[in-house]
Amino acid sequence: MSDADAIRSDLAPTGTLRVGINMANMLLVTDREADGSPIGVAPDMARAIARRLDMPVTLHPYPMPGATADALSAGEVDMVLIANEAERAKTIAFSPAYCGIEATYLVPDGSPIASLADVDRPRIRIAVAGRAAYDLYLTRTLKNAELVRAAGLPAAVDLFVDEGLDALAGLRPALIDNAKTIPGARLLDGSYTTVLQSIGIVPGRQQGIDFVAEFCREACRSGMVADLLARHGVSDRLTVPSEGI
């Protein structure tokens, strides 16, 4: 078996590369084709990997990041494009990141919260999209504030407004849009984390792991990722590491 065949066998035992796509990330999936196929940076990255391997690819959309991660564990897909987060890394082998998105908080009109440091205090309630990468990060790092989870960011926004919560956690680009619809709401300066977007595969498939790691580094170094961000109109909302991190 050649090295190329071994990589294909590692990454796609069925002969078709089955890729899970997180449809909730509106920066990396910006639209759909008429048949429902996802359009955006993440789908294009998946297709580029398949072209490099010279094999067919099928894209499998999932409504939330948690469901996307679960699909890999269940064997429904061979690869996922989701945020690289420590909790997920317990069951997923991640590549270096190919882009990153800052995460921060939105606070309501008249809020006394002035900085990120003001958020993690007793009796502060934070709306968050359950099982999003930033939810996993905050679950691990917050000491005093309470996370109130909803099924996805739109539901978390509704929760934030309807229940008068103290803050809304999310990715900065999405929160900028949310702030436009909530009178007086404002984003806090800085970020509590940068959510790194990576390619994840089944642990233990070392040749496949090495391949996707090098693919991501080259995609960043060559400008391919930057070109995809520009093509899909999201260059101003994501950062690209020079060689993957």
Image (cartoon, grey):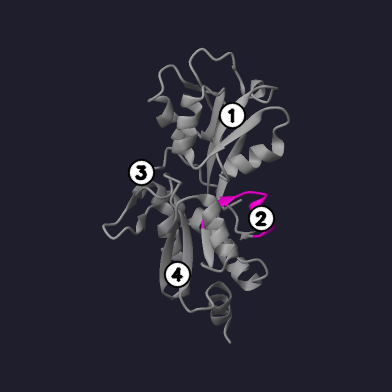
Which portion, as a residue range, is magenta? 81-91
Dot placed on the residue nearer the N-terminal end, 3 or 4: 4
Q: Could you tell me how far apart the alpha carbons at marks 3 and 4 are, in whole angstroms?
A: 23 Å
Residue labelled with disc 3: 233
Q: Residue at x 54, y 78 (%)?
A: 13
Return the residue nearer the eye: 213 or 93.
93
> Could you tell which of marks 4 and 1 lies nearer the N-terminus?
4
Where residue 63 sits: x, y (%)?
45, 51
Name the mark nearer the viewer: 4 or 2: 2
Label 2, secondary structure: give it: helix
- Three-letter code, disc 2: Ala
Residue 193 spot, x, y in % from top left: 61, 37
Q: Residue at x 67, y 49 (%)?
A: 86
Element under disc 3: loop
Residue 40 to residue 116: above or below: below
Work out which quarter of the rendered image holds the N terminus and state it: bottom right
**Crowding near pointer 3: few (<14 within 10 Å), some, many (20+)?**
some
User: From mark 3 to mark 2, how far is it between C-alphas?
Assistant: 29 Å
> Dot 4, how many residues are within 10 Å of its Cα: few (below 14), some (14-19), or many (20+)?
many
Nearest the eye: 159 or 222:
159
The residue where tag 2 is placed is 89
**Relative to 64, does residue 156 appear above or below in the rendering?**
above
Depth check, mark 4 against mark 1: the one in front is 1
**3 or 2: mark nearer the eye:** 2
Q: Is residue 98 visible?
A: no
| Mark 4 → mark 1, Cα distance in angstroms | 40 Å
> N-terminal of the two: label 3 or label 2?
2
Q: CA distance from mark 3 to mark 1?
A: 30 Å
* Residue identified by numbered label 4: 50
Residue drawn where x is 69% and y is 56% of the image:
90
Residue at the spot of label 1 = 126
Number of callouts: 4
